[in-house]
Amino acid sequence: MHDSNIDDEHELRRPLAITLLGGLYLFFFMLTVSTYGHPLPFFGTIYHGRTANILVFVDSLACLYLFLGLMKQQNLTWYLLLGYNAFEIMNTVTNLLIITAGDLEKIVGEPIDPSGLLSSNISVIVAIILLSTFIFRHRDYFTNRSKYLF
């Protein structure tokens, strides 16, 4: 009888990959919230003030939903994760192509190394592609077919 309780416990355990992804998207949530009140580059335009705050708020809600969906192992979250990551890649590429280091220097008030800006953005793109590949391959972990988180 005791062994069956252990088997039930193993069935209820969340896979390590889902737990780690959840932690990552919780980190993304906290990172996004921390940019509230600062200028925000979004699809080739640097937004300030209320518009930037609204964009950060919406992005924060998206990251929070993704975190909660990961913790619930929601099937819909699998699609949303891939869509969110594709959106982030498009945003990063667009910003890289349109916003110059000079534009950023005006906002930051310090010199910016264009090659460093390029390499850091390419690193982000590669990391998101690798993350998306990992998520794509672990679709079978998203077993909750419910459309609602709660």
Image: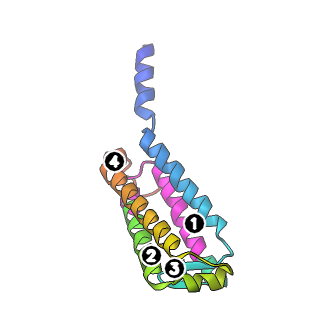
In front of the other: label 2 or label 1?
2
In front of the other: label 3 or label 1?
3
Q: Identify the residue at horizontal 59%, vertical 72% (top origin).
A: 56
Residue 42: numbered disc: 3
- The residue tagged 2 is 91
Q: Amino acid at mark 4?
A: His
Cα gap from disc 3 to disc 2, whole angstroms: 6 Å
Cα gap from disc 3 to disc 1, whole angstroms: 14 Å
**Mark 4 residue crowding within 10 angstroms, few (<14) / some (14–19) / many (20+):** few
Q: Is residue 70 magenta?
A: yes
> Hey, which quadrant is residue 7 in on the image?
top left
Dot 3: element? strand
Dot 2: element? helix
**Mark 2 residue crowding within 10 angstroms, few (<14) / some (14–19) / many (20+):** some
Q: Earlier in the sequence, mark 3 or mark 2?
A: 3
> Hey, which quadrant is residue 108 in on the image?
bottom right
Residue 138: numbered disc: 4
On the question of residue 48 being in view, the answer is no
Dot 1: element? helix
Q: Identify the residue at horizontal 32%, vertical 50% (top origin).
A: 139
**Mark 3 residue crowding within 10 angstroms, few (<14) / some (14–19) / many (20+):** some
Residue 19: numbered disc: none
Query: Which region of the structure is painted magenta?
Result: 55-80
Q: Position of residue 17 (x, y in %)?
A: 42, 43
Q: Amino acid at mark 3?
A: Phe
- The residue tagged 1 is 60
Dot 4: element? loop
Q: Is residue 75 magenta?
A: yes
Mark 3–mark 2 CB contact (< 8 Å): yes
